[in-house]
Amino acid sequence: GTYYYANNSGYIQTGWLHKGSWYYLDQDGKMVVGDYYINDQYYYFNSNGDLQLGWYYRDNQYYYLDSNAVLVKGWNKITNKWYYFNDQGIMQTGWQLINNQWFYLNASGDMQTGWLKSCNKWYYLNKSGVMVTGWAQIGWKWYYFNEDGAAVKDDVVIDGKTYTFRDDYSWISNCTRKEFVERAKRYLGCNEKDGSFKKIIDSYNKLDPLPRGYKVKYTDSWCMTFVSAMVRECNLLDIIPVECSCGKAVEKAQAMGIWQENDAYVPQIGDIIMYDWDDNGNGDNTGWPDHVGIVAEVNGNTFKVIEGNKNDAVEYRTMTVNGKFIRGYITPKFLS
């Protein structure tokens, strides 16, 4: 039937009417139901004439009307989830190309982030929901996604160079001992006085997640932070522990089975030396590790070490095998 509303004066009312819910009466006073445009704005009134707010389902499609009963379009955050509505206000699902970027919206319309398996392929959607292509560091590992966004595995040629990826799609670094040392050499001379050391701290803080959740400050000691930053940049996180604490790094190295305390050990380039300033060189391997560096050169019984935070800079130090101050070594298992 057709409904009208007479006000207290007995006149048939037109326009908006609020009686618990909002209603709209057309120019003839008829209560509106269904789709209706008012001042070029779309509204929807249910079969009882109530102005629709929030979600509604019609013709196998979902729509959403905001608190002003306006049909939403484009991106909208609803109850802490992101949805996308096309130009007709229809909620979208599945893969969607929006402004030349791919997104994935699940069957409920929620924008997805993180890892996604679709058609037996794995994809990664960043924090903004955008499908990732090319190289991406996720957690402590590197991955490569082809032009279609699918993660690659096994041997893959990228820009003319062959890379190997595990069954979990993570890249197996082929960084050598020499390349690890060469990476550290790039930072020689960086210091606190001119602020150039800050890029080392910034590099370390790109670890995700950060070890123990701690973000290193520019005012912190940064010797182990330097070593860990080089590990991150060379993608050696599978074989060398990352930390900003020397003591914690030793604990992790022991758990990995790569800790060496033999005073007579002759290090290789790429090994990581831990110092104990109270060590007297007579087999005392029980002190706290105070400092750390990367072995850069070995010549008989002497070797050179690159250290961060040495005199507030990245500098060399020359050491002697079985000499004073050696707490032990982290001995990574490089592929070559």
Image: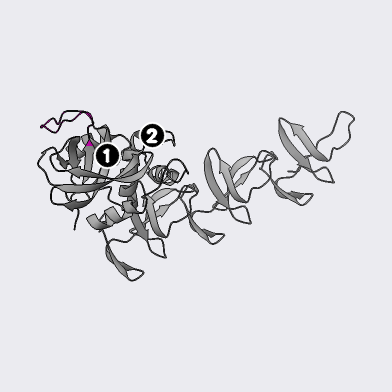
- Tag 2 secondary structure: loop
Describe the element under mark 1 as helix, strand or loop: strand
**Is 152 in front, or is 198?**
198
Pinpoint residue 296: horizontal percent, then vertical percent: 24, 51
**Amino acid at dot 2:** Tyr
* Residue at image point 48% right, 54% down: 130
Residue in the foreground of this view, choosing between 160 and 322 = 322
Name the spot of residue 125 as percent of width and height, x first: 43, 52
Instruction: Identify the residue shown where x is 85% and y is 31%.
Output: 7
For disc 2, the neighbor class at 10 Å (few under 14, some 14 to 19, many from 20) is: few
Label 2 sits on residue? 214
Image quadrant occupied by the C terminus: bottom left
Q: Earlier in the sequence, mark 1 or mark 2?
A: 2
Left or right: 97, with 277 as reference point: right
* 281 is within the stretch colored magenta: yes
What segment is highlighted magenta in the picture? 275-288
